[in-house]
Image (spheres, rainbow, N blue to C red):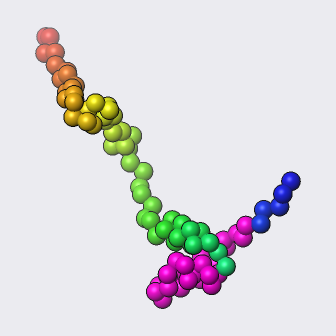
Amino acid sequence: MKKDKRRKVTSEIMEKMRKLRKEGLTYAKIADELKLGQMTVYNYLKKKEKPIEEEKPAEEKKEEKVGFLERLGLVKKKKPAKKEEKPAEV
């Protein structure tokens, strides 16, 4: 089995990346200085910059699926049928 040659990005390295980025260094210069790949620096910094989204209820997450022909504008999307409420019998 081959040994993994990749360097692990520790919390110390993350601190250095953030500090250098705040100082205005480019991703390429940070990567050179820390002996990492440019995309590694970019991905770690972007991943940490994104705010964690709160969990949304399942109803809000669900999006309507749009078919291929609907996206092309060849077919109009069908509206869901409204459910009629039955009057309560006394």
Residue furthest top in the image: 90
Q: Give, as a single range, the part of the protein colored magenta.
A: 6-34
State whether the magenta stretch is mostly helix, strand or loop: helix
Residue furthest right in the image: 1
Reply above or below: 2 against 22. above
Reply above or below: 68 against 26. above
The image position of residue 39, as x and y in percent, is 56, 68
* The stretch drawn in magenta includes residue 9: yes
Which quadrant of the rendered structure holds the C terminus? top left
What count of labels does the image hold?
A: 0
The image position of residue 18, as x and y in percent, is 53, 80
Q: In this view, does 13 lie to the left or right of 43?
A: right
Q: Which is nearer the eye, 66 or 64? A: 66
The image position of residue 1, as x and y in percent, is 86, 53
Residue at left offset 78%, top offset 62%: 4
The image position of residue 57, as x and y in percent, is 38, 44
Q: In this view, does 36 lie to the left or right of 28?
A: right
